[in-house]
Amino acid sequence: MLASGSIYRERMLRDAGFELIIDPPHVDERAADHLLARLGPGGLAVELAARKAASVAVRHSQSVVLGGDQVGVVQTPRGPVQLNKQPDSGAAVAQLMSLSGTTHHLYNGMVLLDVPSGCRVSGIDVQRVTMRAFGAEEALEYVQRFEPLDTAGSYRMEDSERMAPLEPFVTSVVGEDPTGVLGVPIPMLRRLLVSLEDATRGAAGRDHPHGGPPGR
């Protein structure tokens, strides 16, 4: 059960061979912004992922629910600034310009919740993204062409191959796997599935210490 309305997450998971049921969560992501200083970007991403999974779990009592979130952070002279979805093209251009010639980090939080047992596992994936220097005219042209208002940071890696005659903004990505840039780190997800299976087996063993159902 995928607790997300993102067409990008759905597409990536299906391409990786996962069978999904989609149920978008009802979570106000911005309501947790104040937790960034206390939890850090990775902790905030996991917190948001957990809230999304919990929001969906109440409707699916026999499912395994996947919640995920990505928190982007760029360092500025005023300190770290969180990257968010922007309400209009002007704000998107301004945010995109804040990334020109800089390196920022994308923190993916992922939570798997086995609803019947209550077992939960989580993980954090980090991607280091470096962008070339570009000007406001390029940023405006990009935003007008691709309308990236549905993504934090106001750019999409998926657009890189279609940006000509503009050059792609991203010059390098450092992380475990490229899927992490797109918000679904597949290698980490596979590890979490193994961990969740182990956790649910352990929970079943504690409930039935002799390996079988209780006697009548």
Image: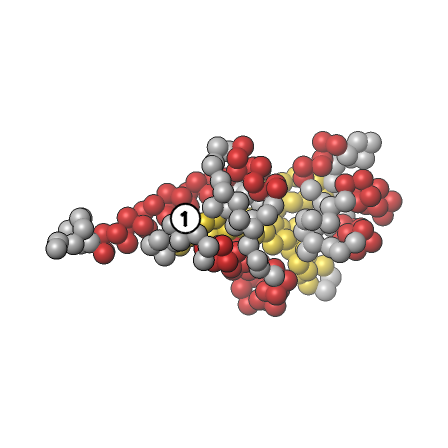
Q: Residue 142 appears in which quarter of the rendering? A: top right
- State the image coordinates of residue 169 (x, y, percent, origin top left): 74, 40
Residue 131, compared with residue 25, is above or below; it is: above
Label 1, residues with CA under 10 Å away: few <14, some 14-19, many ≥20:
some
User: Image quadrant for the C terminus?
Assistant: bottom left
The residue that appears at 56% across and 40% down in the rendered structure is: 10
Q: Nearer the viewer, residue 38 or 183?
A: 183
Element type at mark 1: loop
Q: In this rendered view, identify the residue nearer to me: 160 or 199.
A: 199
Q: Identify the residue shown where x is 64% and y is 62%.
A: 30
Q: Is residue 37 above or below residue 58?
A: below
| Residue that lies at the very extreme toward the left in this rendered image | 216
The colour scheme applied to this rendered structure is: secondary structure
Q: Is residue 207 visible?
A: yes
Q: Which quadrant holds residue 180?
A: top right
Residue situated furthest right in the rendering: 137
Q: Residue at x 76, y 50 (%)?
A: 96
Q: Which residue is mark 1?
A: 63
Measured from the top left, where is residue 39 in percent x and y? 53, 64
Residue ID at (48%, 32%): 17
Image coordinates of residue 208 in percent, x first then y, are 20, 54
Can residue 127 be seen in this snapshot? no
Q: Where's residue 29, x and y in %?
A: 61, 60
Foreground pick, 172 / 67: 67
Callout 1 amino acid: Ser
